[in-house]
Amino acid sequence: MSQISIAFLPLKIDVETKAVLRKVASAHRVLAEFKGILTSIPNQTILLETLTLREARESAVTSPQIIEAL
């Protein structure tokens, strides 16, 4: 098995490109909208638990592929 090297922080490259900042702004808007919708749901925990389980299931499917790639 090969070893993985992790770069020290701060990175030597600039990751705050215009494209990245646009995506961050877009994600911020979507999360704010989601938060607004979430506050209108009487039992917010149900939705959050469902999303957590879905993410965990999808991560479990992709994780073996990522590990094999390393």
Image: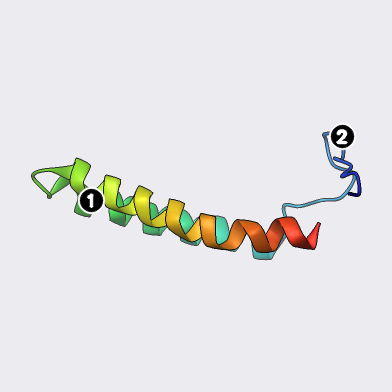
Q: Amino acid at mark 1?
A: Leu
Q: Which residue is mark 1?
A: 47
Q: For this rendering, which residue is in front, 61 or 24?
A: 61
Which of discs 2 and 1 lies nearer the camera? The answer is: 1
Side (left or right) of 5 relative to 67: right
Q: Position of residue 3 (x, y in %)?
A: 90, 44
Name the residue rendered at 30%, 56% in the picture: 33
Residue drawn at x 87%, y 50% as measured from the top left: 13
Q: Indicate which disc, 2 or 1, sits on the residue closer to the N terminus.
A: 2
Find the distance from the CA under tag 2 to the CA under tag 1.
38 Å
When asked about the image quadrant of residue 24, the answer is bottom right
In-front residue for pair 24/53:
53
**x and y, in percent, of residue 12 in the image:** 90, 44
Q: Residue at x 72, y 55 (%)?
A: 67
Residue that mark 2 sits on: 8
- Vertical side of 64 occupied by 1: above or below: above
Q: Give the amino acid type for the residue marked by disc 2 in the picture.
A: Phe
Circle number at residue 55: none
Residue 20, by quadrant, is bottom right
**Coloring applied to the structure:** rainbow
